[in-house]
Image: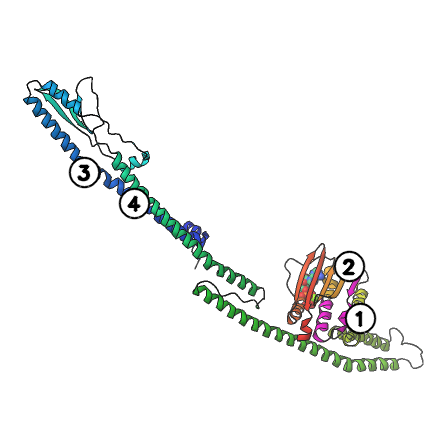
Amino acid sequence: MEPAVPSLADRLWNRLSLRARLLLPMAAMVVGALLLGGLALQTFSPEQFEDENAQGTRSAQRVAEALNAALAAADNPQPTLDAFAASLRPPAAIAFVPSGPDRRNVPSETYHGSVPAWFTALLQIPELGSTHPVAIRTAHVGDIVFRPDLSAEILEKWVGFLAIAGSSAALMLLAGLSAYFTTGTALRPLTHLGAGLTRMRNGVYDTPIPLAGPPEIRKSCAEANELAATLKRLSRDNRDLLRKLVAVQDDERRELARELHDEMGPLLFAIRANATALSDPEAEGPPEPGSPAHGILSATEALQQANRRVLEGLSPVYIGDLGLAVSVRALLRNAQSQAPGLRVTSRIDHRLDDLDGLLSQTTYRVIQEGVTNVLRHAKATTICVTATVNGGQIEIDVSDDGVGLPRDLTFGRGLTGMHERARALDGDLQLLREQGQTIVRCRLPLDQLIAG
Ligand SMILES: Nc1ncnc2c1ncn2[C@@H]1O[C@H](COP(=O)(O)OP(=O)(O)OP(=O)(O)O)[C@@H](O)[C@H]1O
Ligand SMILES: [Mg+2]
């Protein structure tokens, strides 16, 4: 089954940090609350305004009725009207507005104050004013006009809105700060856990992960520490096994070399002696070229040489007897004789002579396989072998100026063997290409000598 392709929203969400994931819903809630508040204001405010100003409309209606009645009853209505008009001083919500071109004193429905225009627009204030005609006899002389001043009501709603918005923002800030610090304290142990797992991947098992943070994370840290202990045990077992394997391999090689030397050596010598005896006893010196005895003799010599080469490869006799430095020099002389054009340089620390056992075998084998690989694969003009004791470890470098390692390098028996030997002694093997040099670099800790 094909894996489902994550949607854009999923991808965006996956990129968010834990803090952002906590803060984002909170911010969405605050914005949602404000939007809901705005919607409620828009829905209920017009009705509220109408209710609150209905009384004013009724009052204006009654004033107009009373005035009309008074004017109807008065003999001289004009002074009564003037006196009434003068008594309603602006800025009253109810005013008398005479008809004709002289329409003064029309109260406006505008409101003043510091409320922003967008908020007043949001309230959707309905048409609240009313106009009631005033007549003397049948002549229309003006109107009683009611224009409410909404400033106070709008300000009240604005203050309410600000209070809701302010308290939501303050709550959001508090919740945000609390989420920020809580995730901070929860994430720090996770960082330690991550660092601990990286150490484990690099083979370092001795530094425990500190147990901190909430119980769930503490438990994971404890589990990771247990895992490190198990890995450490397995790695030690693995190394011990490798070391045994390498030791058994070396023992077997030595045994094989001894057998070859003890069995084949005398037999080959006997064949040689007999071949010489088979040749014409009258003739002095070696057998005639082309004679059967000469053929047997040449084949035997070739076999003896091959036997020596195999013996050399199986078990270098020098290490035990002459020490590592001399053995390595012999190895390099041999390499030089196989490739006369090759310039061979070496620097072998004389302290390596004091090594014995697995460590000296390993050092020798790494150099031997490194040199063989240069001869076989590198097409080099120079080869440099260094083996030094430095800072509690043996540093072995076999470098050449040849073609370099292939891109699609696959380990054969040589590199695999080197690697296993190095790991068996808790060392490491690196293959490098630096400044035109192919370098096989092996590091072996010296304390393995004591431990092993
Ligand atoms: N100094 C070198 N220069 C160039 N290529 C090298 C060098 N050393 C190793 N190689 C490459 O690494 C490969 C693996 O080497 P390795 O020694 O493991 O196997 P091998 O030499 O091919 O065979 P064997 O198992 O007999 O050793 C080689 O085939 C070769 O391509
Ligand atoms: Mg090889």
**In this view of the protein, can residue 353 be seen by the observer?**
yes
Please say if the residues under marks 1 and 4 sit with CB atoms less than 8 Å apart.
no
Q: Which stretch did the figure color magenta?
A: 341-369
Residue ID for mark 3? 51
Left or right: 382, with 238 as reference point: right
Q: Within the displayed image, which quadrant is ligand 2 positioned in? A: bottom right
Q: Which percent across, then down, holds residue 66?
A: 9, 27
Left or right: 366, with 197 as reference point: right
Q: Secondary structure at mark 3?
A: helix
**Of the image marks 4 and 3, the number of the one nearer the N terminus:** 4
Q: Which percent across, then down, holds residue 156?
A: 27, 39
Q: Nearer the viewer, mark 1 or mark 2?
A: 1
Q: Amino acid at mark 1?
A: Val
Q: Which percent across, then down, holds residue 39?
A: 28, 42
Q: Which mark is residue 36?
A: 4
Mark 1 vs ligand 2: CB below 8 Å: no
